[in-house]
Image: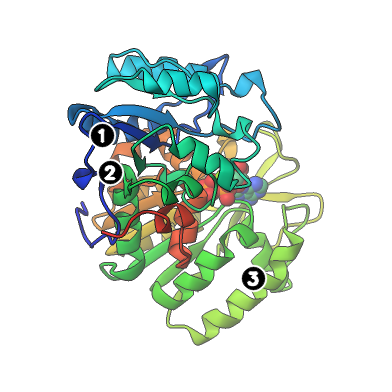
Amino acid sequence: MTTDTGTFAKASVRDAEVEGRRVLVRVDFNVPLEDGAVADDTRIRAALPTIELLRERGGALILTSHLGRPEDREPELSLAPVAARLSELVGAEVPLAPGLVGPEVERQAAAMSEGELLLLENSRFEPGETANDPGLAKTLAALADVYVNDAFGAAHRAHATNEGVAHHLPASAGLLLEREVLELTAVRDDPARPLCVVLGGAKVSDKVGVLERFLEVADRLLIGGAMCFAFFRAQGIGTGDSLVEEDGVELAERALARAEESSCELWLPHDLVIADEFAADAERREIENTAVPDGWMGLDVGPRTAGEYAEAIAEAGTVFWNGPMGAFELEPFAAGTRTVAEAVAAAPGTTVVGGGDSVAALTEFGLADRVDWLSTGGGASLELMEGRELPGVEALDDA
Ligand code: ADP
Ligand code: MG
């Protein structure tokens, strides 16, 4: 287990003065919904330590989050199901305000007392949110006396609820956001060696920043997922009907060139599972090489590759995994991802996993609690790993 491995340069919620004050708390309640209910409450639970701390200290909490990508006020993207689930988790009533700002919201906020909770409606119903509108940030700030940001998953965006508003109030980091930054920064800057990074998923372009960064700092970089076909195309190997990201080929070529210069080993699959279509009942074959014939597509790494990746994971002092090894949603093509997930769960080194689908895969395999740190932030964790500043973190007060 990693614990507090580093120092965090931003003000912490632990030191915030909240007694008898209204605290605006930016949380990441961007959760999956099914039939009008929360399908996975991981992100809500992850915010509970900060919420409990602030309630115990006598704050009145005004919670704000976005949900999905609404074009306008889409009723199916209301936070009502989230308010209901949160209410169950904290054992207290959590009313849902009709909007992010406005006279009724102001009235509800003004009437709150110590320990009470209020959830503001989906912040992206307000067009000024993603535009980081200064007027909106100011109006929002006027609802509260103090601001806390615990929404690590949104920290790579400069929006009104997580960037603009922080400039108008005493602003500190919540417990989850702080821990995310510490855990991920430790892997990037101070890993126990060897550092083994496993990258998969759909697109090279999503992950090229992390890939190039880790070619500098990792000892082994293992590539899987559809991403590998951009590399094979760059190497002149046939990819058949596999998902190849055209823009990724040049990026892959550049990464291959960098790997030549680097002391980091870049591993690519050398066997594959192929199918004649993207479907669970497709015809399935294992091939001993990576040349995908015409009319076929690669949907998983082969068993030999998965086994070698598992060994590298077992030998590592630190493992960072982002992105599944194949189309794991289809059971016949989940084996590579499962082998990697099991290796990560069993690894003696420090293990950190980021990325929505990789975390979903671990959860599906029942292995989520066997990893040292599961990041709640996909895009945010990648940008942090790349070494980019996260606007949601930068905007907070310095410690
Ligand atoms: P994460 O969310 O963990 O960062 P990504 O979103 O980058 O991961 O990629 C996950 C998606 O990539 C999954 O939907 C998976 O089906 C898809 N995928 C992985 N390998 C393949 C493949 N060989 N062919 C098609 N899709 C793939
Ligand atoms: Mg994803």
Near mark 2 (Cα within 10 A), the count class, few <14, some 14-19 or many ≥20, is many
Which mark is drawn over residue 175?
2
Q: Nearer the viewer, mark 1 or mark 3?
A: 1
Q: How far apart are marks 1 and 3 (CA)?
A: 41 Å
Disc 1 crowd rating (10 Å Cα; few below 14, some 14-19, many 20+) is few
The image shows residue 133 at horizontal and vertical percentages of 60, 46
* Spatial CA span between label 3 and label 2: 37 Å
Tell me: 283 left or right of 2: right
Q: What residue type is labelled 1?
A: Pro
Q: Residue at x 44, y 41 (%)?
A: 359
Coloring applied to the structure = rainbow
Q: What amino acid is labelled 3 in the image?
A: Ala
Give the secondary structure at mark 3.
Answer: helix
Q: Which corner quadrant of the image does residue 18 belong to?
A: top left
Question: In the depicted view, which residue is nearer to us: 53 or 294?
Answer: 53
Which of 242 and 136 lies nearest the eye of the viewer?
A: 136
Which residue shows up at 30% across the image and 57% down it? 10
Residue situated furthest right in the rendering: 295
Asked if the residues shown at circle 1 and circle 2 are in contact, with their CB atoms under 8 angstroms apart, the answer is yes
Residue linked to disc 3: 252
Q: Give the quarter of the figure containing the C terminus.
A: bottom left
* Residue 182 position within the rendered picture, expressed as x and y whole percent measured from the top left: 29, 57
Q: Which of marks 3 and 2 is in front?
A: 2
What residue does disc 1 label? 49
Q: Which of 367 and 49 is in front in this view?
A: 49
Disc 1, SS: helix
| Residue at image coords 37%, 53% | 396
Residue 263 is drawn in which quadrant?
Answer: bottom left
Q: Is mark 3 within 8 Å of ligand 1?
A: no
Q: Where is residue 281 in the image (x, y as percent from the top left)?
A: 68, 31
